[in-house]
Image (tube, helix red, strand yellow):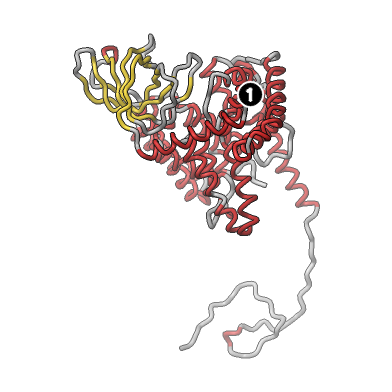
């Protein structure tokens, strides 16, 4: 069991805070030299007080600073910047960071990585950053497509409302992904007759929203279980489990785990690079490394975070990235506790509560009660949706029953919604963290007490014997006892 006060575990709150600062675009990332000097001074001050672990302190501080630099690069690259005044901009050009998603107004929401802009007079220039764009089209636009949109900004200047759009380039791989998604969606349309059940299957397997999805999604939000419907590590682990069972039977335990990577990798390639899926896939890959058994789960978590921020720097301003890493970081922070009911969900709520308040102005602890049965039902819904996709309409009947259970649970939870404020969140966090520290301290005291009570006290009596050194060249007694090894001179 991991130590509750492990140094790597104590860095998890700092890791979570850094991600929150990044998504807020904090000005702290604009001063890398000053931050580096401050960290160096802290190391110089702390090193004399901890001489035995000064090397570890330097390494941990260096890693923290490297992660800070990576987050700073992502924040700088995601902040919008235009060659002409933003209020005069009427046209934007860029590349889709991920597949578009359907909004409540039946528009497609794009996350556009900008490359250019233009004003009314026709003159334009370069542009950088990431901008959300609403486009009045029904067709899903796939990631990596280059588009140009015409429209106007909203009152805050943070969202671009497009009235017209032109698709400039779609890479061959994106075309293949789009054809695959259309084929899978067509298969679901044939196998599942009920539109609402089909919408749930499409949401869980493909991550595609439809008009019928919003009713169930709204109920899930009121229940504090919205994360269960969004593509996340839970959905990827479903495919990892299925592929592991299959390939372990075919190739054994060792090679089965390696070949089991094929299915989740294909799944991520098919549905797109969602931040939560990349986090789960990266951690699974690092856990299969040659030295994985020698390191705790914290190491794959940190390595995945570093790699994802490095390869996908713009994802640091994505709320899906924040939700995934903040929730899992706090779950790891609370690991090592004795098995307590709902402890995992409670720590996930601690990590994602501020994000919920940033989006909606409130947080919802109701997930503590509904997450366990909802997770079970959603896993069953994924299983029957997958079977319906493979085997045909005969699996749609049990899927209908599961959907009714999910809808009934979310309906009951939405009728008793808890939407709380900052004050209640702070109180909840203080109580939970205080309990964590108290339980951790009590656990350490109990372990020390047990070691003292069950320590073996052995009384050894050594007989008188010949204790001459072997260096003297004379035979010695086989019972001789050395308290210190002499320096032996070896001859040629």
Up the image or down, 152 lies above or below 1; here it is above
Instruction: Describe residue 320's horizontal placement relative to residue 127 as left or right.
Output: right
Instruction: Describe residue 212's horizontal placement relative to residue 448 as left or right.
Output: left
Instruction: Describe residue 117's horizontal placement relative to residue 240 as left or right.
Output: left
Q: How many marks?
A: 1
Q: Position of residue 428 (x, y in %)?
A: 65, 22
- Disc 1 crowd rating (10 Å Cα; few below 14, some 14-19, many 20+) is few
Q: Position of residue 269 (x, y in %)?
A: 47, 40
**Quarter of the rendering containing residue 408:** top right
Query: What residue is shown at x 67% (from left), y 35% (from top)?
Result: 395
Instruction: Describe residue 340's horizontal placement relative to residue 19 as left or right.
Output: right
**Quarter of the rendering containing residue 157:** top left
Q: Position of residue 224 (x, y in %)?
A: 63, 22
**Quarter of the rendering containing residue 109:** top left
Query: What residue is shown at x 57% (from left), y 37% (from top)?
Result: 233
Label 1 SS: loop
Up the image or down, 65 lies above or below 189; here it is below
Taking depth in this image into account, of 196 and 381 the one nearest to the observer is 196
Identify the residue position indicated by label 1 in the image.
194
Q: Residue 40, can we see it? A: no
Query: What residue is shown at x 66% (from left), y 20% (from top)?
Result: 223
Q: Position of residue 458 (x, y in %)?
A: 79, 64
């Amino acid at each position: 069991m991991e130590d509750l006060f492990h140094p790597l575990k104590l860095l998890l709150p700092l890791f979570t805070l850094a991600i929150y600062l990044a998504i807020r675009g904090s000005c702290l990332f604009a001063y890398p030299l000053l931050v580096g000097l401050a960290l160096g001074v802290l190391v110089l001050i702390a090193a004399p007080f901890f001489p035995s672990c000064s090397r570890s302190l330097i390494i941990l501080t260096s890693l923290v600073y490297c992660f800070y630099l990576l987050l700073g690069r992502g924040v700088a690259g995601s902040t919008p910047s235009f060659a002409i005044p933003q209020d005069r901009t009427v046209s934007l050009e860029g590349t889709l960071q991920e597949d578009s998603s359907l909004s409540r107004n039946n528009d497609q929401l794009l996350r556009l990585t900008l490359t250019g802009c233009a004003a009314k007079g026709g003159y334009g220039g370069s542009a950088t950053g990431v901008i959300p764009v609403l486009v009045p089209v029904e067709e899903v636009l796939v990631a990596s497509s280059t588009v140009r949109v015409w429209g106007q900004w909203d009152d805050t200047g943070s969202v671009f409302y497009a009235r017209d759009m032109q698709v400039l380039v779609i890479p061959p791989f994106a075309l293949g992904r789009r054809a695959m998604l259309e084929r899978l969606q067509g298969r679901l349309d044939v196998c599942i007759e009920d539109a609402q059940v089909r919408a749930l299957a499409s949401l869980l397997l493909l991550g595609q929203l439809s008009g019928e999805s919003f009713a169930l999604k709204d109920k899930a939000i009121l229940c504090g279980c919205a994360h269960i419907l969004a593509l996340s590590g839970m959905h990827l682990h479903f495919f990892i489990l299925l592929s592991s069972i299959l390939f372990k039977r075919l190739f054994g335990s060792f090679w089965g785990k390696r070949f089991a990577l094929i299915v989740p990798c294909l799944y991520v390639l098919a549905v797109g690079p969602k931040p939560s899926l990349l986090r789960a896939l990266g951690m699974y890959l690092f856990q299969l490394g040659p030295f994985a058994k020698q390191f705790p789960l914290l190491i794959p978590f940190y390595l995945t975070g570093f790699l994802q921020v490095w390869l996908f720097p713009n994802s640091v301003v994505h709320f899906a990235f924040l939700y995934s890493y903040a929730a899992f970081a706090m779950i790891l922070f609370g690991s090592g506790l004795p098995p307590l009911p709902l402890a995992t969900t409670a720590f996930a709520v601690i990590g994602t509560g501020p994000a919920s308040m940033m989006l909606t102005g409130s947080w919802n602890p109701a997930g503590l009660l509904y997450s366990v049965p909802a997770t079970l039902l959603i896993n069953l819904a994924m299983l029957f949706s997958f079977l319906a996709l493979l085997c045909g309409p005969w699996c749609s009947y049990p899927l209908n029953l599961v959907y009714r259970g999910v809808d009934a649970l979310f309906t009951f939870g939405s009728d008793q919604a808890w939407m709380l404020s900052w004050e209640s969140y702070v109180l909840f966090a203080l109580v939970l963290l205080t309990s964590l520290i108290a339980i951790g301290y009590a656990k350490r005291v109990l372990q020390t007490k047990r070691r003292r009570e069950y320590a073996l006290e052995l009384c050894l009596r050594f007989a008188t014997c010949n204790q001459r050194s072997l260096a003297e060249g004379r035979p010695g007694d086989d019972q001789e006892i050395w308290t210190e090894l002499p320096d032996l001179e070896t001859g040629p």
